[in-house]
Image (cartoon, helix red, strand yellow):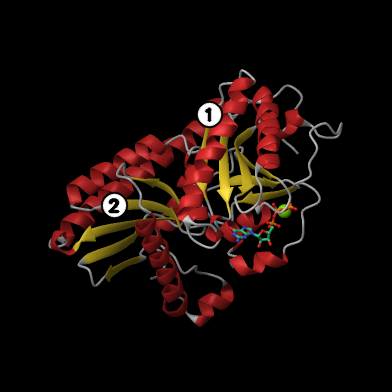
């Protein structure tokens, strides 16, 4: 919550992604399954109720997710009625350089038709590009009971994998229970995006080292704009903790917006609410502490720790500085590698250039 310092320019260079071809995430699923709603809620801050007024998508909608956020990729939202057998459907172009394919199934509806479409989609995409990560969102679970959730996930999992095995295909599908009415959609999308970040094991390792040496219970590395977490330590994530951390980011951004930016700066758009010196500490009434520290313009570290482990804040802050420096080095290395490998991106993002495809879509 203060002004930028001279490191700002340096940070920009660290995270300069100009050189790199953005991974593509495709959203498939039957009509009205909730694809466009997911995209709007996660990346455009649309409130879930407003999605009731979204019109049905009738052509492929491509969008660059790079609004000053660290997480950069393209999202392609497909119309529910897309027909793979249509001669204008260029599967090489669509699946060729795709990083992840998200298939959305409406859990409140009969899902047999969705399962057959899932099978068709996965089979088609896998033939073009076997490196795609397949993610199934069992969506709209806000309206169903816990028992139904578990039962439908088991049933969908079973049927979907059986169908693929019957066709002789050994394709791994990941399943997520999601709803736009809670944080589950952000959590699921975080996991999808993490699979596209090749530095994930290194980031996890750094977080593990940080938490064990600082008495922290859980730490998330957040992309502040989207509230997607790009990494966390290896302890399991529970939804409540994740929600608390998301809420903390909202509080910090809102307060910074009100008190951290002067009217003049706001008018000149000189400063964003989140900057190099942003940090915040919230004590909860159950002896838990939430601690947020800015890592760079786009990323924040949010930690949860017990009050009794917060006696030596200096040690935690020092460890954080080392952590921040290491993260900087990881991404510095990445941008160097990307510059030198500009022609060959296959290693970094499983990018496979099909023979008939050019970069401009
Ligand atoms: N209850 C509930 N409704 C949802 C959820 N997500 C989306 N919806 C609703 O589902 C309806 C359809 O959403 P869309 O996002 O337009 O669906 P789509 O998959 O893009 O549909 P097409 O563009 O026709 O393929 C809207 O009325 C949304 O409000 C959810 O998590 N829970
Ligand atoms: Mg749509």
Q: Quadrant of the N terminus?
A: bottom left
Give the label on residue 36, or none: none
Residue 82 lies, in percent from the top left, at 78, 41
Instruction: Please identify the residue farthest to the top as the structure is shown.
Output: 168
Q: Is residue 282 left or right of residue 262?
A: left
Residue of label 2: 218
In front: 265, or 279? Answer: 279
Crowdedness near tag 2: few (<14), some (14–19) or many (≥20) residues, C-alpha within 10 Å: many
Up the image or down, 138 lies above or below 239; here it is above
Q: Give the quadrant of the C terminus.
A: top right
Are the two marked residues, 1 and 2, in contact with CB atoms closer than 8 angstroms?
no
| Residue located at (42% from left, 73% from top) | 256
Q: Of the residues tagged 1 and 2, which is closer to the observer?
A: 1
- Mark 1 crowdedness (10 Å alpha carbons): few <14, some 14-19, many ≥20: few
Residue 172 image label:
1
Left or right: where 125 falls relative to 69: right
**Residue 2 spot, x, y in % from top left:** 38, 71
**SS for callout 1:** loop
Question: Would residue 70 be visible to someone looking at this image?
Answer: no
Q: Position of residue 304 (x, y in %)?
A: 28, 58
Q: Is residue 330 above or below residue 238?
A: above
Name the residue at 37% across, 54% down. Answer: 295
Residue 277 picture quarter: bottom left
In x, y percent, where is residue 158?
54, 33
Q: Mark 2 CB in 8 Å range of ligand 1?
A: no
Q: Is residue 262 visible?
A: yes
Disc 2 is placed on an element classified as strand
């Amino acid at each position: 919550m203060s002004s930028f310092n001279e490191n700002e320019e340096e940070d920009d260079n660290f995270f300069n992604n100009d050189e790199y071809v953005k991974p593509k995430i495709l959203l498939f699923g039957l009509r009205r399954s909730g694809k466009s709603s997911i995209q709007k809620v996660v990346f455009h801050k649309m409130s879930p109720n407003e999605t009731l007024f979204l019109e049905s998508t009738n052509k492929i909608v491509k969008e660059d997710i790079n609004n000053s956020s660290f997480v950069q990729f393209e999202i392609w939202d497909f119309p529910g009625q897309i027909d793979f057998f249509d001669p204008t459907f260029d599967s090489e172009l669509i699946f060729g350089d795709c990083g992840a394919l998200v298939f959305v199934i409406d859990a409140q509806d009969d899902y047999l038709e969705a399962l057959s479409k899932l099978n068709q989609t996965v089979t088609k995409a896998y033939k073009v590009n076997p490196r795609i990560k397949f993610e199934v969102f069992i969506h709209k679970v806000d309206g169903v009971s816990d028992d139904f959730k578990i039962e439908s996930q088991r049933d969908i999992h079973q049927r979907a994998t059986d169908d693929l095995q019957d066709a002789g295909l050994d394709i791994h599908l990941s399943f997520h229970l999601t709803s736009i009415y809670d944080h589950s959609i952000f959590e699921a999308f975080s996991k999808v995006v993490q699979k596209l970040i090749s530095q994930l094991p290194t980031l996890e390792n750094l977080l593990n080292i940080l938490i064990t040496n600082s008495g922290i219970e859980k730490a998330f590395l957040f992309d502040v704009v989207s509230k997607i977490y790009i990494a966390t330590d290896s302890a399991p994530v529970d939804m409540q903790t994740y929600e608390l951390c998301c809420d903390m980011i909202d509080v910090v951004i809102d307060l910074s917006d009100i008190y951290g930016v002067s009217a003049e700066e706001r008018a000149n758009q000189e400063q964003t609410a989140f900057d190099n010196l942003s940090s915040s500490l919230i004590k909860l009434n159950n002896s838990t502490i939430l601690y947020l520290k800015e890592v760079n313009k786009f990323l924040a570290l949010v930690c949860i720790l017990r009050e009794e482990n917060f006696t030596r804040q200096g040690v935690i802050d020092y460890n954080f500085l080392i952590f921040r420096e290491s993260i900087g080095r990881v991404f510095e290395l990445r941008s160097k590698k990307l510059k030198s490998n500009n022609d060959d991106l296959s290693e970094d993002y499983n990018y496979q250039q099909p023979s008939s495809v050019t970069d401009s879509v």
